[in-house]
């Protein structure tokens, strides 16, 4: 099983044009190796085809020794991979706001149990804003398919201007902020609550207002056939929504 998954991860790297870098000295990159880890749950590996973790995390630039925040970590799909990538000298802060924890209580309990045997992972719970504070500066702040939730009624909603400023403060100079989410129709202010989507232009405007510099966008998870009008949990689109991945950088000075 491990050999099959590893082969798939290596193939993904080669497809992305990353073979020479990732396979230096005949070894897979830390990202490919973490994705190929045979201890990952089948429920997670079954999602790899849709989530493209090797390519997506390569775009994010996560590496050995990094300090990473996985915000709204849920069951820890990305937390598990981050842990393998950053290694023993890095650290992963899997953050779960109390406002959403009630929906993921079983998954969070399992993640906390898993973290007991993975010393480079800390699982934090508490209010949404409290979960943006860390004991050390971060290299990467990651929020996947959940930025829109900050604007949902069950979250308060969260003051996203204050949230992005807190993320800016949490990162090292030169640190990376990744926002991955489901695309909504342009200007649709009701989409976060109604469809669990968000207008990418709004995200960029809000994040840049906090002082971040837009560094690029990945189309790895784009789906031009998504009409942007269906709830993301609708069977017609679930797992195949049009998703944007924005990379922002905290200026070095």
Image (cartoon, grey):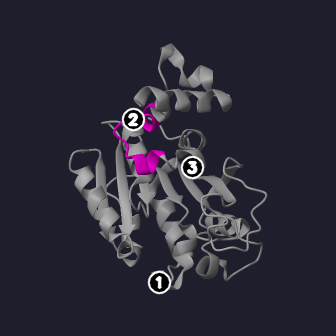
> Of helix, strand and loop, which one carries label 1?
helix
Residue at figure coordinates x 64%, y 74% from the top left: 231
> Quarter of the image holding residue 93?
bottom left
Please tell me whether mark 2 sits on a helix, a strand or a loop. loop
Q: Is residue 69 magenta?
A: no
Q: Which residue is mark 1?
A: 154
Q: Residue at x 23, y 55 (%)?
A: 113
125 lies above or below 48: below
Q: Is residue 156 visible?
A: no
User: How many residues crowd mark 3 within 10 Å: few (<14), some (14–19), many (20+)?
Assistant: some
Residue 37 badge: 2
The reply to whether the magenta stretch includes residue 34 is: yes
Residue 66 place in picture, x, y as percent:
42, 41
**Badge 1 density bin: few <14, some 14–19, many ≥20, Cα 10 Å:** few
Query: Disc 1 vs disc 3: Cβ atoms closer than 8 Å?
Result: no
Left or right relative to 29: residue 240: right
| Structural crowding at the residue carrying mark 2, measured as other residues with C-alpha within 10 Å and reported as few (<14), some (14–19) or many (≥20) | some
Q: Position of residue 212 (x, y in %)?
A: 61, 58
Considering the numbered disc 3 on the image, is that residue within a helix, a strand or a loop? helix
Q: Nearer the viewer, residue 140 or 120?
A: 120
Mark nearest the camera among 1 and 3 is 3
Q: Percent from the top left, x then y, of residue 126?
A: 32, 72
Between 227 and 95, which is closer to the camera in this rendering?
227
Left or right of 144: which side holds 219? right
- Find the distance from the CA under tag 1 to the CA under tag 3: 26 Å
Q: For the point 77% across and 72% down, which residue is it?
A: 186
Q: Which residues are magenta?
A: 33-45
Counting residues from the start of the chain, the first of labels 2 and 1 encountered is: 2
Report whether residue 117 is seen: yes
Q: Tell me where residue 90 appears, x and y as whole percent.
A: 35, 40
Of 207 and 200, nearer the camera is: 200
**In this figure, which residue is indicated by the disc labeled 3?**
51
């Amino acid at each position: 099983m491990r050999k099959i998954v590893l082969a798939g991860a290596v193939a993904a790297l080669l497809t992305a044009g990353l073979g020479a870098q990732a396979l230096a000295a005949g070894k897979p990159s830390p990202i490919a190796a973490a994705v190929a880890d045979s201890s990952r749950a089948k429920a997670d590996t079954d999602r790899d085809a849709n989530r493209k973790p090797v390519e997506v995390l390569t775009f994010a630039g996560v590496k050995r020794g990094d300090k990473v925040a996985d915000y709204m970590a849920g069951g820890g799909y990305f937390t598990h991979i981050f842990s393998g990538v950053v290694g023993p000298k890095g650290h992963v802060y899997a953050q779960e706001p109390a406002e959403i924890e009630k929906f993921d209580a079983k998954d969070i309990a399992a993640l906390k149990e898993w973290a007991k045997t993975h010393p480079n992972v800390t699982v934090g719970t508490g209010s949404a804003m409290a979960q943006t504070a860390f004991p050390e500066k971060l290299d990467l702040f990651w929020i996947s398919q959940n930025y829109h939730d900050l604007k949902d009624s069950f979250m308060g909603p969260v003051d996203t201007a204050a949230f992005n400023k807190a993320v800016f403060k949490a990162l090292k100079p030169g640190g990376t902020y990744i926002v991955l989410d489901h695309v909504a129709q342009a200007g649709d202010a009701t989409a976060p609550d109604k469809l669990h989507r968000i207008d990418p232009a709004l995200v960029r405007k809000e994040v840049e207002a906090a002082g971040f510099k837009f560094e690029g966008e990945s189309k790895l998870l784009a789906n031009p056939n998504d009409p942007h009008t269906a709830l993301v949990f609708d069977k017609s689109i679930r797992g195949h929504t049009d998703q944007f991945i924005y990379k922002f950088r905290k200026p070095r000075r």
